[in-house]
Amino acid sequence: MDLTLTEKHRALRDEVLAFIEKYRGVAPSPGGGRKRPDAKVLEWQKLLLEHGYFARSIAREYGGFGAPQDLIEQAIIADAFSRAGVSPGIHNQGISMLVPTLLEVGTEEQKRRWVGPTIRGDIIWCQGYSEPGSGSDLAAAKTRAAVDDGHFVINGQKIWTSSAHYADMMFLLCRTEPEQSKHAGLSYLLVPMNTPGIEVRPLRTMTGRAEFNETFFTDVRVPVDQIVMSRGQGWHVANITLKYERLLLGDPNKLQQRLEAIRRMMTQPGPDGSRLLDRAEWRDRLLQLQGEVMAGRHHNLRLLSEQAEGVDSGLGRLIVKYHGTMLGHRLASLALDVLGSAGLHYEPQGETGEDDTATTWQIDYMYDIGLIIGGGSSNIQKNIIGERGLGLPREPKAAVPAGGN
Amino acid sequence: MRFGLTEDQGLFDRSLRAFLSDRLSLETLRRLAEPGTGFDADLWRGLGGIGLHGLLVPEEHGGSGLSMLDAALAAEALGYYAAPAPFAAALVMAVQAFHSAGDAGQQNEWLPRIAAGEVRISLGFAGLAGQTGRAALRLDGGRLSGALDGLMDGGEATHFLAYLPDGRAALLEAGSVGTTVTLRRSVDRTRALADLDLAGVAPVALLQSSNDPLAAARRVCDAGRVMLAADTLGAARNMLDRAVAYANERVQFGRVIGSFQGVKYMCADMATMLEPCRAMVWYAAYAQDALPEEASAVAAHAKAHLAEVGREVARLATEVHGGMGFTDLLGLHYQFKRITFDRQVLGGPERCRHDAAVAQGWIAA
Ligand SMILES: Cc1cc2nc3c(=O)[nH]c(=O)nc-3n(C[C@H](O)[C@H](O)[C@H](O)COP(=O)(O)OP(=O)(O)OC[C@H]3O[C@@H](n4cnc5c(N)ncnc54)[C@H](O)[C@@H]3O)c2cc1C
């Protein structure tokens, strides 16, 4: 264990703090990733990339800052932004899930073509995994891509596709080898959303907005080189993306940011002039969550350290999504309780405006349940933790298949 | 920068665990726990043989001068095997007490004897740590009187270190005139608490050379809290491992019960709660040596969080074993009671969280 800051690290910390002080006025409000980045967000992203506070260790030829991988630098930057309550940049499906997937298994050409514009926020991606008949059972996907004249020809339907209504591209899991077994017949394609034959129909969610969609494919043609790895390896690639999705969904820096925001709310005097932080029962609720967030953050440092050393964290990694999303929901729950009846005010501004504090927390509180379900539900995470993490036996297959599809 | 254990630490951890697993068969544990003193001369000597006595004592005083993180690994291993041996107070807090408030002469005199395993100090606070029980001590004309309950590592202790409300600490010899020691067998038969009644006892040493005695006492309490957190981590991990093993072998309805999701999810929940606790305990231990501004808050948080997680794991792991879990047969209850004990000693979670709020400047003390 060695967490000492070198001269260089201390300088970086001072530099980041000075940056935040200087520029926090032009920063967009933290969170987001559920709307197309507007000019303010894109400007902020550009500023972060220039200073190396985003995509710090992604190579320059792919559009990153090109600094050597340094765990403590990463931690210093994340910590400074989350404590200050300032946006750390865009975290969407393209940036946090597709980019690391391409960096891991993409071709040189794919990395050069997609990584730069994606991390700048110019290209927005959506994730085409779930179908009406296959959610948790993702490998049962039926959307079909047949090869014809140097193209994949895609037919089928995806559902719950977040951001599809404004996305430029989709990473799509589909069946290219129908004669192969369930898991071996899949491929992972990169599909421009403006290709003829794609139809996106928004689905309204419990937040009252339409964050996700149904996506229909009718004879959609994509060149055969728009594939990550090769035909039949889609399940492998999809799981790499899921690995990053689960780390994103359980991100402890986001939890830290929320905790700080709630603590600040609790230091505001209420109508009677007193602060909730001075009341033992409220303070204890906050402190309990602080302890849990603390455990999550230190756990994350351990995982980053293991990752840097090429050690597979196994169980340690498998628990992150379940742990983080459940904790996120409990933080949002405390925020609603702190706001009380004044926090019931609810006027979502849609995708053009900025929501007020009460509305934002109400949306987060609901959306968190979506995050508990999406990316592999809590139950699916527990199956994985139990079976892959702890070595418990799989559920036996049902002797008689259930009806329906 | 590296967040993790060194190779040496891994080695130390494995050899301590190998020793404990070899020494503490369930049969032996049962026998050693029976008297409830939390002490066995053989086991104590054995632990000395692998360097536990002088773990934190500097090399110039005959120890190995290791770090608080090494001590936390040891505490975790002792918790895992529910070892009936003095540790948190006798080998960690006592050493920390001499470091933070003992003068050079006192360190010269006592640290080598701790490292040699011949002095075993039981320790308790009047006030500071938030334990329940009597805590009324006064020092008049160099003599100590009053009552102090719940001193840790009380069984077979050679000395008692009693913290006064002002943060100074008086070292007393067991059996000195005016000292009455009542050993309380605790629900955790692997560790005992001692109650002291003192009538004008002359201390053999007074640790008072810190210019901020309360802060010095706080550091000792913090070190103890980290050790108890680590102990719970070990005990809870043991219970989870055994629950998983049992779920893989017990058959009902023609299947091993671990293939039922209800059972699998209990195990997954335990693992999800427990896994981040390792890093939390490592960090808290490391902070005691290297991050003074955070040390107190993270020690309090680790103690509180492990107490909450420990309680859940203790229940769930017992439940996974069905009726068998409730019996004495498996001995799962030794770890269960270890967790019960750790939660209350040096302040329960509410108290610890309160201390964390104070340490972070959220509220006044
Ligand atoms: C906010 C949100 C955003 C999303 N965004 C996207 C996106 O961008 N792209 C995309 O492709 N998908 C997306 N999804 C879909 C998401 O991945 C699926 O909803 C999820 O995988 C669950 O699938 P399902 O909805 O079909 O539920 P089902 O699979 O029908 O599950 C219903 C219930 O059954 C449980 N269950 C199912 N199988 C098991 C099992 N084997 N063991 C125990 N319990 C089980 C589940 O835990 C759940 O509680 C999103 C979902 C949400 C809520």
Image (cartoon, coloured by chain):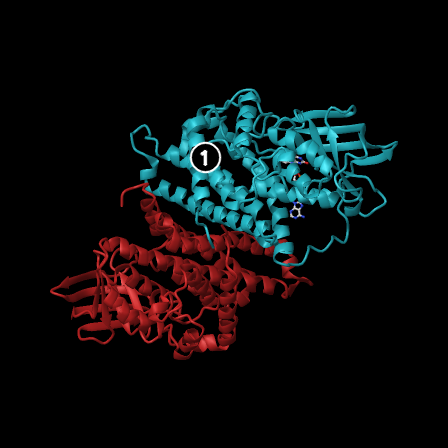
Q: Residues within 10 Å of mark 1 (few under 14, many from 20)?
A: many
In which image quadrant can residue A39 be found?
top right
Residue A38 vs B269, above or below: the answer is: above
Task: Give the residue displayed 54% in from the left and 24% down from the top.
Answer: A43
Residue A385 vs A260, above or below: the answer is: below
Foreground: B305 or A32?
A32
Q: In the figure, is residue A190 to the left or right of A292? A: right
Q: Residue furthest right?
A: A149
Rendered-image quarter of ligand 1 = top right
State which chain disc 1 sits on.
Answer: A
The image shows residue A88 at horizontal and vertical percentages of 51, 33
The image shows residue B306 at horizontal and vertical percentages of 44, 55
**Chain seen in cyan:** A
Foreground: B154 or A48?
A48
- Secondary element under disc 1, as helix, strand or loop, is helix
Q: Is residue B39 visible?
A: yes
Tell me the shade of chain B: red
Three-letter amino acid code of the residue under disc 1: Val
In which image quadrant can residue A286 be found?
top left
Quadrant where the C terminus of chain A sits is top right
